[in-house]
Image (tube, grey):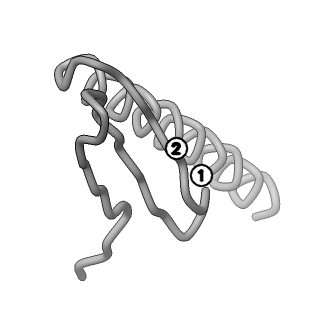
Amino acid sequence: MEEVLYNIEISKESGRFLGKMYSDVDGVKEFKNERIDQLLRDIIFDMELALDEFSNRFDDFSENREEMK
């Protein structure tokens, strides 16, 4: 099963890169940086944090289900 987690748009305006990240969970987030590599680093870091948080919630849910059995 395939599911889109994020849609990312990157543009350049006035010498700065603008990244917009869309997700069903977090809505729209914007990132700005003068360097593309740092912009991508910020976007990836934010995705990692969100996915770690989701993973932790899933683990808590799984533990609670095991305790209910």
Asked whether 8 or 35 is in front, the reply is 35
Position of the N terminus by quadrant? bottom left
- The residue closer to the viewer here, 60 or 2, is 2
Residue 2 location in percent, x, y?
23, 78
The amino acid on which the numbered mark 1 sits, given as a three-letter code, is Phe
Task: Find numbered disc 2 in the image and state the secondary structure of the residue it sits on.
Answer: helix
Decide: is 55 above or below 35. Answer: below
- Tag 1, which secondary structure? helix
User: Farthest right residue?
Assistant: 68
Q: Please tell me which residue is depicted at 50% across the width and 35% down the height of the picture.
A: 52
* Quadrant (top left/top right/bottom left/bottom right) for the C terminus: bottom right
Q: Position of residue 37 (x, y in %)?
A: 17, 20
The residue lying at 36 percent from left, 34 percent from top is 43
**Foreground residue, 68 or 12?**
12
Q: Residue at x 25, y 28 (%)?
A: 15
Q: Residue furthest bottom?
A: 1
User: Horizontal placement of 20 versus 8: left or right?
Assistant: right
Picture mark count:
2
> In the visual, does 5 lie left or right of 25?
left
Amino acid type indicated by mark 2: Ser
- C-alpha span from label 2 to label 1: 5 Å
Up the image or down, 24 lies above or below 58; here it is below
Rendered position, 40 above or below 7: above
* Residue found 30% across the figure and 34% down from its top: 14
* Rendered image: mark on residue 55: 2
**Crowding at label 2, few (<14), some or many (≥20) Cα neighbours within 10 Å?**
few
> Is label 2 in contact with label 1 (beta carbons under 8 Å)?
yes
Residue at the left extreme, as displayed: 37
Q: Which mark is residue 58?
A: 1
Mark 1 crowdedness (10 Å alpha carbons): few <14, some 14-19, many ≥20? few
Location of residue 3 in the rendering, given as x and y in whole percent from the top left corner: 31, 76
Q: Which mark is residue 5?
A: none
